[in-house]
Image: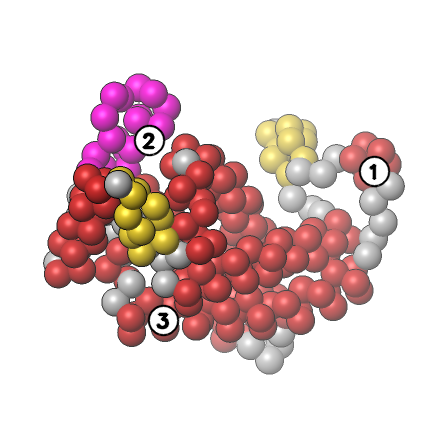
Amino acid sequence: MKHIVNKHPLAIRWFHWLNFPLLAIMIWSGLLIYWAYDPYAIKLFGHTVFKFFPEWFYQKYHIKRRLAEGMAFHFVFMWLFAVNGLLYVLYTLFSGEWRYLLPKKSSWREAWLVLLHDLHLRKTAPPQNKYNAAQRIAYSAVIVMGLGSLLTGLAIYKPVQLYWLVFVCGGYKTARVIHFALTIGYCLFFVIHIIQVILAGWQNFISMIRGFEVADTDTAKIIVKRTDDERTT
């Protein structure tokens, strides 16, 4: 017999699906800004070992310097991204959803076991509730990353008016490096997140759209019990 098990509240789903296109636009517009001036490369003894976007990339794909367009999109959607993130954090705090997201003392050890299981190097995965240990760490980290992007972005955007923020970030150049590094972090998070969704199965994905999961009696009882246990801890 199948049962409907509620998993994700409507607010969480809205924040999740709004954040996806907003972050995509932020990364795209950020690339337009970066392509206008791309100084970052890995050098060894004065020789460039790796450059994120070598000259052949610009020539092959006919990349144009669209600085003004990139800045226009970036600075408009920056506020939407920030507001969506702020509302998400406030909702998790006041609704109690933070209990499912905040890492526990055992999360770091269990996250390693989750990784070994996903790589098929361990037969069984550690017990999980609504989110496993790796997801807890990743979802909490991306919130911190979002705050870092906002602060470093404001420091780059208004370095004179927000001189104190530039100082906190370690200077204008350092703020830009951190901002760029966080963008790489978002891309890595996105890839890992998609892999985790695929490994978790179709039911897990569709539950983020409709808010519930269809499970058999035994599985439904386990999910409800784990959710109740976590809500009371």
Q: Seen from this angle, which residue lies furthest bottom?
A: 161
Q: Secondary structure at mark 2?
A: helix
Q: Secondary structure at mark 3?
A: helix
Q: Quick check: 121 left or right of 163?
A: left
Q: Name the residue carrying label 1.
A: 61
Magenta extent: 107-127
Check residue 92 for magenta coloring.
Answer: no
Q: Amino acid at mark 3?
A: Tyr
Q: CA distance from mark 2 to mark 1?
A: 36 Å
Q: Seen from this angle, which residue lies furthest front?
A: 1
Rendering coords of residue 165 (x, y %)? 50, 72
Instruction: Tell me what residue is drawn at x 55 percent, y 77 percent.
Output: 162
Instruction: Tell me what residue is drawn at x 59 percent, y 61 percent.
Output: 22
Mark toward the start of the polypeptide (2 vs 1): 1
Report whether residue 108 is seen.
Answer: no
Q: CA distance from mark 2 to mark 3?
A: 29 Å
Q: Name the residue carrying label 2.
A: 115
Q: Name the residue carrying label 3.
A: 91
Check residue 126 for magenta coloring.
Answer: yes
Mark toward the start of the polypeptide (2 vs 3): 3
Nearest to viewer (mark 3 / mark 1): 3
Q: CA distance from mark 3 to mark 1?
A: 42 Å
Q: Quick check: 87 left or right of 45?
A: left
Q: Amino acid at mark 1?
A: Tyr
Q: Of residues 207 and 72, which is closer to you in this image?
A: 207
Q: Amino acid at mark 2?
A: Leu
